[in-house]
Image: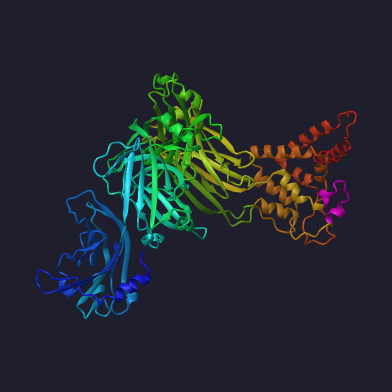
Amino acid sequence: MLSSSAVDKSHSSISSEKPLSSSRDRSGRAQEIMAVDRPGEYTAKCRWTVESFPCRLKSKALWSKYFDVGGYDCRILVYPRGDSQALRGYISIYLQIIDPRGTTSSLWDCFSSYRLSIVNHVDDSFTIHKESWHRFSSKKRSHGWCDFTLNSSILDPKIGFLFNNDFLLITADILILNESVSFSIGNNNELNSIAGPMPDVLSGNFTWRVNNFSLFKEMMKSQKITSPVFPAGESYLRICAYQSVVNEQEYLSMCLDSSDTEKTVLSDKSSWCLFSMSALNQKPGCTHMNRESYGRFASDNKSGDNTSVGWNDYMKMSDFVNPEAGFFVDDTAVFSTSFHVIKEFSSFTRTGGLIEGRNGTRNGQMGKFTWRIENFTRLVNLLEKRKITDLYIKSKRFQIGNRDCRLIVYPRGQSKAPCLHLSVFLEVTDSRSSSSDWSCFVSHQLSVVNQRSEEMSVTKESQNRYSKAAKDWGWREFVTLTSLFDQDSGFLVQDSVVFSAEVLILKETSLTKDYREAESANSVSQIDNTVKSSFTWKVENFLAFKEIMETRKIFSKFFQAGGCELRIGVYESFDTICIYLESDQSAGTDVDNNFWVKYKMGILNQKNPAKIVWKESSICTKTWNNSVLQFMKVSDMLEADAGFLVRDTVVFVCEILDCCPWFEFSDLIMVLASDDDQADASATNPDEIMDSEEREEDTFQDFLARAGITLPLGENPSQLQVTLQEKFLMDAGAISGFLTDLRVYLDDPTKAKRLLLPTKISSKLTKSDESSASLLNLLMGVKVLQQAIIDLLLDIMVKCCQPPKEGSHSDGCVAATSSVSKVGLSYY
């Protein structure tokens, strides 16, 4: 980027300079004038005045005379009606640079930062500026904009681009990088040129000297300077330097880049590279700045590979340009990189599971990928020498079911030191989807192949659901490094290791529907509408997973119902198809939130939807997480005429009938017990407890609100019994979980006593109002709980009435149980 002062200075010299050249077009009607201002050897500003521009619109192209900048010939190209790539009605403008030694030479290239402008003579603030940077070469001599601006705005005399309705002024501000490079491969064999065919370069050192760095320092705040390219494996790389602001500090940023390197590289070509990048200190005996990184480079990032790896905060710019530091001397900066590329071979075959697509294409859901890494010992030794840990190597991409898959290997293991195992993972991504909610279910079998006896290969198998948040699954301790490097084990042969991955991806679609259904007027609940939802999961390659489901399970993605995340799971047990609903118990979810979910699960009959098979159940997301439902025999489901399996597709449907917050028994007691109760467990006067604090909300109202139920103030507390009976305890599993909590609670004599204390109904009632029965009395009013609670109390009485052991203290237990027995007997 040029500073504004430089632009103003150059602009003021237009009228005082004599034109360098003038010429006429083919018709001989229009004259053009050129003037070039050269503040330095490697910088110039050209002003090209095109006379009679409106009359030259029919010309296909206009071009200025050549002018010299830094030893290269430059000129401006204009397409008045746009070139072949331009939108209709646009003018195209380019900068062209060639080597004066002759256009037939292919050994040259140069880096340039430039700005092209169309000057507005009336108001300079309307002048159109566009700036860019490019490395020009014999293959790419021109660079600019096909849609520079609308030609209608240029031709409008009121806007001010045409001087005297005739002259058009186009300017070009150009900077040329003064540079030199050296490149050595292998054992420091230096090459004089990087052009032309190159052998496989697996290691080397590239040094780039910039001799006019200060000329580009301002420009680097918004653009990059780039070196010539050099080969590294199947890729061509280059050094990029620019300036970034990190935490309000200006930093020199550096990276290796493989994008747009102007070399003919197939899109599926890529190279994994371990590299170090240095800013060389030019003072003798001083330390260079050095940083290391790694990655897989490709010509584009469409397949998930890197096109650029480096650091925004490589080093502080103030330290780099400090004259005393030695990195920037006599306007010269020197950058260097050394690299190591793995030698690898890979193959991929589809192994069945081919499905005919609508457009005639065949998308396989199953495949096998084999990956051979050579010079493996050398790589591990290099990592150990450089003390690099947690380094991983990504394989080339292979596609299954329109998903991008890769193997990931940690040569020194992923676990903390000491590193004893090789780690292997499978990565699955979706490059087509920009959203974060994509997911797919994958069954994978990863192997470290024994090259002498395939039966001795180490193989591990698993099934997982991949997503943007969980895109790689595998094993940290796949095989011990001792056995891997044992020369007699068969895993390392001729210093090469072979990995394989057999991958099967579930072909699926899912649909979630939320809807409201008005409740009847006789409903116990006073809520006008109840939210329900349904989740439909279509599995389109069911038979491919049949064998897997005999020992393992497949499961859908999570869907939302109420305030919880749920998913469907399917497996086979004794030739019976089993389906369950479970909640998300993964890290990051709020496991303290407990929900009761009533649902019905079905297998859709695709030939006759009326014959769908339904089964109903419920779960509690925290207390009992899943409930398995046994459906039909697998053999019956797979019958061709049954209608459940059609074209290898099975459809599962889950309808959420009810979903509400659930409570544990201890939560209920905490609501009923005041702070004073907890501080003095021996208090027995109910009046003191009732009058201890005026509450704004009724005790039961508070509890029921937490449970998702509305109960009017002043209502008889027996309403709680009705609500629990009808709303919650219609499920045997729920009763079991409730009684389990109650049993644990009654083991504490102090807590048991609280069950017998009277409860207060509403703070809005006067003090003369009587208190309600105890909580235990209210619970005994729930018919489905009565016998279970009586049995539980009798069991506790027997236990507490046992003769106490010498030195034991059981008075509290006996007293509490004695009072409890009265409550139990009163309900017989």
In this picture the colour scheme is rainbow
For residue 181, above or below residue 548: below
Residue 398 sits in which quadrant?
A: top left
Q: Is residue 575 left or right of residue 740?
A: left
Front-most of residues 217 and 669: 217
Which quadrant would the C terminus be assigned to in this image?
A: top right
For residue 375, above or below residue 74: above
For residue 19, above or below residue 263: below
Task: Give coordinates of residue 738: x percent, y percent.
Answer: 70, 40
Residue lying at 29% horizontally and 69% vertically, measured from the top left: 117
Inspect the magenta stretch and tell me whether residue 83 lies in it.
no
Residue lying at 43% horizontally and 31% vertically, measured from the top left: 545
Q: Which contiguous range is marked in magenta?
A: 676-690
Residue lying at 85% horizontally and 60% vertically, measured from the top left: 768
Give the number of marks. 0
Q: Is residue 743 visible?
A: yes
Task: Give coordinates of residue 349: x percent, y percent.
Answer: 33, 31
Front-most of residues 278 and 785: 278
Query: Which residue is situated farthest in the right direction here?
Result: 806
Q: Is residue 400 visible?
A: no
Task: Give coordinates of residue 19: x percent, y percent.
Answer: 20, 73
Main secondary structure type of the part rendered in magenta: helix
Task: Give coordinates of residue 340: x percent, y percent.
Answer: 39, 38
Query: Which residue is situated farthest in the left direction here?
Result: 27
Which quadrant would the N terminus be assigned to in this image?
A: bottom left
